[in-house]
Image (tube, helix red, strand yellow):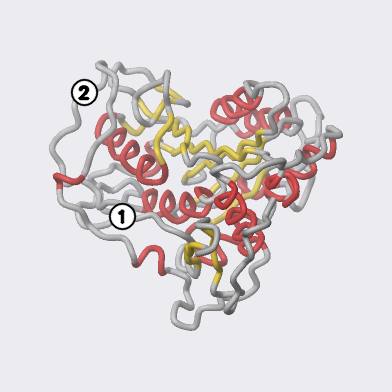
Amino acid sequence: FLEYVSGGCQINIMVAVDFTASNGTPTDRRSLHFKNPSGWNNYQQAIISVGEILEKYDSNRRFEAYGFGGQLPNGKVSHCFALNGNAQDPYVEGVQGILDAYSSSLNNVTLYGPTNFAEIIRTAHMATKRTPPGIQSYKVLLIITDGEITDMEDTVDAIVDASNAPLSIVIVGVGPADFSRMHRLDGDEQVLTSENTGRRVERDIVQFVSFRDLKNNGPLLAREVLMEIPDQLTSYYESKGVKPGRRTEVGPDWDVASMRVASFRQASSFKTPTNPNDPAGVSSLASMRPAAAAQHSMPSVREDYAAPPTVPPPPAYDSGLPPGWEEKVDPSSGRSYYVNHQVSKGYTPNLKDTP
């Protein structure tokens, strides 16, 4: 995995949010989509916590962001709609962009159903086929859902079809639902097999994470989210006989890529929390701050979307380095580097002769 990422393999994140009615009416405090004027609802918490983990490894920190199971303003029920309302350009900037687009859709899209995963998985699968020849690009699809799936066998077929593509799927379950079906999709206990065709997945590409069990333990959440992606990425390229690329020159993203690899390895090998002052690993959530309405900007939407009603905006998301990381500058070369204080003590790299 280290060799592929350092060799130029691009990791791109796609996010899909469950907009089905089983989540509860957004005006109801019991709803997982509750429009809370003074805090985050369950989906916003999951977007922040898991998005912050995955954002560090995305090549450009621009996410394709979709919703599924919602009824659009034109009355159509869609199982794959752009969260920002722009089907031609569904990309948003970072975790803050996902939060803004989610809030906009929540004000314009009616929670509906059913809860179908297959279309969004096929959308991610098709996206992997648009990579230009000669470019190593790997996609990670993050699905955030309450788990009440209604197209199980169609979803299994979609996963089987995609198991030969450069794709990993992370399913994050929110709320109190029974997630036993999600564990079947995970395939850790039994190889995922289509009941319709008898085909089996060519490789395991799904990881299920129960957010309700881990939301107060940031390090363990990171470990669960990232645990299978390195092996899934490596197994895909090795199955195709594709070797890691060679990094021949230092580009502007070199330091960021190096940090991604180091923190990915740290998170996926996590054993126990190492920060005695933050045993639950919630420092990233504690750093979030509210914002005045004037600071909040909503993404542009298509003309067929109604303007969102005047509601208190969600607090701004304050992104940064992973907990324990610090950016420093080498005085001799002027280049930035990153230090993980949880594993590095007094270490200063020599960047003068770095290739």
* Residue 213 visible in the shown view: no
Q: Position of residue 180 (x, y in %)?
A: 61, 51
Please state if 287 lies on the left or on the right of 140 as rendered. Answer: left
Amino acid under disc 2: Ala
Closest to the observer, 101 or 36:
101
Residue 76 vertical position relative to residue 210 in the rendered view, above or below: above
Closest to the observer, 243 or 281:
243
Q: Residue at position x 38%, y 31% from top?
A: 83
Q: Position of residue 10 (x, y in %)?
A: 63, 38
Q: Which mark is residue 348?
A: none
* Residue 26 visible in the shown view: yes
Amino acid under disc 1: Trp
Q: Position of residue 169 (x, y in %)?
A: 62, 41
Please state if 245 lies on the left or on the right of 259 as rendered. Answer: right
Residue 183 vertical position relative to residue 266 in the rendered view, above or below: above
Q: Residues within 10 Å of mark 1 (few under 14, many from 20)?
A: some
The secondary structure type at the circle numbered 1 is loop
Tag 1 residue = 40
Residue 161 vertical position relative to residue 294 in the rendered view, above or below: above
Tag 2 residue = 306
Q: Residue furthest bottom?
A: 276
Q: Residues within 10 Å of mark 2 (few under 14, many from 20)?
A: few
Q: Quadrant of residue 332?
A: bottom right
Q: Residue at position x 74%, y 26% from top?
A: 196
The number of callouts visible is 2
Tell which circle, 1 or 2, labels the residue nearer the N-terminal end: 1
Q: Residue at position x 67%, y 49% from top?
A: 229
Q: CA distance from mark 1 to mark 2?
A: 24 Å
Q: Residue furthest front?
A: 332
The secondary structure type at the circle numbered 2 is loop
Please state if 40 lies on the left or on the right of 37 as rendered. Answer: right
